[in-house]
Image (tube, rainbow, N blue to C red):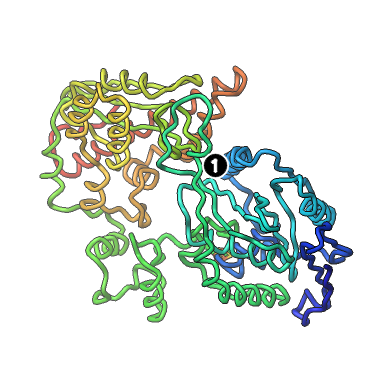
């Protein structure tokens, strides 16, 4: 049955003709005489963007050219998502995909109608529906008995997140209003319980399907209100006035981040470590924007108070405890750093979705305070499983170290723990290495502050502040995410590019450990500890 009605004017959707269709009771295929002549203005992804921020939705629709282009990591995540989607479909043999472009959505809606009517088709991929100006393309629509359907949204995540509910909820809303009876609406995501045994994936185990039938009805009112707000906002001549905040990064980094979060002056209050939005608002209410103007009696934690003092004086602050902390270091010293990727799909036997693949390490070594510094490194450069060669070569190099210096111990220690599980024959050696880890990050965080830290204790910020001749700025690979992307690319590209990527990766990881060597020297010089000599 076809129903055509007029909806109340809602700005840009004024007088839009909405066509819905029901699965007919007489066994004939559903009929869709007409589709809206106006292209849909809100897709499912835009609706979800609007939940994060109405201003983001507005810009996505009206001024998409303001958006930052996705970086290489985002592109890689997208490709990973496609691969996960492709595998999910294999669980629905005989399923038919509806291919369409933005310009031919009417055709996609018509094709969906035909496939819905064809009882030979067990599942439809990218089934396309429109209702009330919202267009959705359903990842998987599976035919069930008694003219009912199962709606599945596939995500390359390891769990159900709050925003997924809206994602599935809007699809359920549109599909149901188009007349299809849904037996369930579910999220299909990767299971962290699944252990890959090598060969082909056991897809039944790799995926977990969560029926959201109980949660979604509770969301209905919120969803309707949200839809109304989105339609209203989109009909306005200007974007809504939304202040930036934590929502700019959660659940995803907004593509308009730079538009709403311009670079602040180096002494801006947002550049205090771990400052929260409420404190920033309180300072704003007092008319304070610069750290220099924060009143002495304004409540700040100890770390913020000393950062404040450092910015006001323009001097490095150091605790009287620093000396004592540095005395705990024992020689031979080694400085260690790992590079990893954590693919959604487990790559080697024994791994689960999102487990880390360690592919590179760098170690700088010093026998005594006056001894020269030596460098060792490992980089996997083919498609073979790198975990065991990584571990064997690392253990050989670090075994004699009395102290192993790292920056953010939780990461290196976590990867070592995983390697111990995969290779129990190394368990004892790994436990010994873990016991000798010495984390430089909290030493700096609790004992040193320089105005150029700008509120951050990341190596990228701390290094140029304390060792001005070193920085990551002009490096081809300049952070961990880029290293992962470069490594994946190196495995597949031609020789010349491969050589360049290899050099960039070695330079980056080597810089991380040499940075620790130099930082430790600076700290020792400041604290007058033996061994605080300029490194070569
Ligand atoms: S940067 Fe923040 S405030 Fe600006 S559009 Fe994005 S989410 Fe909204």
Q: In this image, 29 relative to 381: left or right?
A: right
**Residue 58 vertical position relative to residue 6 in the rendered view, above or below:** above
Q: How many marks?
A: 1
Q: Residue furthest right?
A: 33
> Residue 47, image x and y in percent?
64, 65
Q: Is residue 83 visible?
A: yes
Q: Which residue is more in the foreground, 16 or 341? A: 16
Give the structural element (helix, strand or loop) at label 1. Answer: helix
> Residue 257, image x and y in percent?
55, 59
| Location of residue 8 (image quadrant) | bottom right
> Residue 119, image x and y in percent?
76, 49
Q: Which residue is more in the foreground, 11 or 184? A: 184
Q: In this image, 170 relative to 479: left or right?
A: right
| Location of residue 398 (image quadrant) | top left
Quadrant containing the N terminus is bottom right
Q: In this image, 325 relative to 75: left or right?
A: left
> Residue 155, image x and y in percent?
55, 49
**Residue 322 vertical position relative to residue 178 in the rendered view, above or below:** above
Quadrant containing the C terminus is top left
Ligand 1 closer than 8 Å to label 1 CB: no
Q: Which residue is labeled 1 in the image?
A: 73
Q: Which residue is more in the foreground, 487 or 84? A: 84
Image-quarter location of ligand 1: bottom right
Q: Is residue 474 visible?
A: no
**Residue 180 vertical position relative to residue 204 in the rendered view, above or below:** below
| Location of residue 285 (image quadrant) | bottom left
Q: Residue at x 24, y 77 (%)?
A: 297
Q: Which residue is more in the foreground, 171 or 426? A: 171
Label 1: how many residues lie within 10 Å, few (<14), some (14-19) or many (20+)? some
């Amino acid at each position: 049955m076809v129903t055509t009605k007029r909806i109340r004017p809602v700005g840009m959707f004024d007088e839009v003709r909405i066509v819905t269709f029901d699965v007919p009771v007489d066994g004939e295929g559903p009929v869709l005489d007409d589709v809206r002549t106006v292209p849909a203005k809100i897709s499912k992804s835009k609706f979800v963007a609007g939940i994060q921020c109405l201003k983001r939705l507005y810009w996505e629709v009206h001024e998409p050219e303001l958006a930052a282009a996705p970086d290489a990591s985002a592109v890689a995540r997208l490709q990973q998502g496609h691969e996960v989607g492709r595998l999910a479909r294999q669980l629905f043999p005989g399923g038919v995909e509806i291919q369409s472009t933005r310009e031919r959505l009417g055709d996609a809606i018509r094709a969906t109608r035909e496939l819905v009517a064809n009882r030979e088709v067990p599942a439809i991929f990218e089934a396309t529906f429109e209702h009330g100006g919202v267009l959705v393309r359903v990842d998987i629509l599976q035919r069930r008995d008694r003219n009912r359907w199962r709606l599945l949204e596939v995500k390359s995540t390891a769990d159900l997140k709050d925003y997924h509910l809206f994602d599935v909820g809007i699809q359920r809303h549109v599909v149901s209003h188009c007349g299809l009876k849904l037996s369930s609406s579910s999220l299909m995501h990767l299971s962290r319980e699944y252990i890959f045994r090598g060969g082909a994936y056991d897809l039944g185990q790799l995926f977990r399907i969560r029926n959201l039938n109980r949660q979604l009805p509770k969301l209905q009112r919120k969803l309707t209100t949200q839809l109304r707000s989105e339609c209203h906002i989109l009909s306005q001549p200007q974007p809504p006035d939304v202040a930036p905040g934590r929502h700019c990064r959660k659940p995803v980094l907004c593509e308009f981040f730079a538009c709403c979060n311009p670079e602040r002056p180096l002494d801006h209050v947002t550049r205090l470590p771990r400052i929260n939005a409420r404190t920033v608002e309180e300072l704003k209410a007092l008319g304070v924007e610069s750290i220099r103007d924060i009143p002495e009696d304004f409540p700040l934690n100890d770390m913020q108070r000393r950062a404040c003092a450092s910015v006001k004086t323009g001097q490095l602050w150091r605790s009287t405890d620093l000396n004592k902390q540095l005395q705990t270091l024992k020689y031979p010293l080694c400085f260690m750093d790992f590079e990893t990727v954590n693919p959604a799909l487990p790559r080697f036997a024994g791994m689960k979705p999102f487990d880390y693949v360690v592919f590179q390490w760098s170690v700088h070594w010093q026998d005594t305070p006056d001894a020269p510094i030596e460098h060792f490194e490992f980089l996997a450069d083919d498609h073979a499983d790198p975990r065991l060669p990584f571990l064997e070569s690392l253990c050989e190099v670090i075994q004699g170290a009395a102290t192993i210096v790292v920056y953010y111990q939780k990461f290196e220690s976590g990867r070592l723990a995983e390697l111990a599980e995969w290779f129990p024959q190394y368990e004892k050696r790994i436990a010994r290495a873990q016991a000798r880890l010495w984390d430089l990050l909290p030493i700096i965080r609790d004992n040193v502050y320089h105005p150029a830290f700008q509120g951050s204790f990341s190596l990228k910020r701390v290094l140029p502040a304390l060792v001005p001749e070193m920085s990551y700025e002009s490096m081809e690979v300049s952070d961990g995410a880029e290293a992962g992307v470069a490594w994946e690319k190196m495995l597949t590209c031609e020789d010349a590019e491969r050589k360049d990527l290899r050099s960039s990766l070695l330079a980056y990881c080597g810089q991380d450990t040499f940075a620790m060597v130099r930082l430790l020297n600076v700290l020792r010089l400041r604290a007058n500890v033996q061994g605080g000599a300029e490194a070569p």
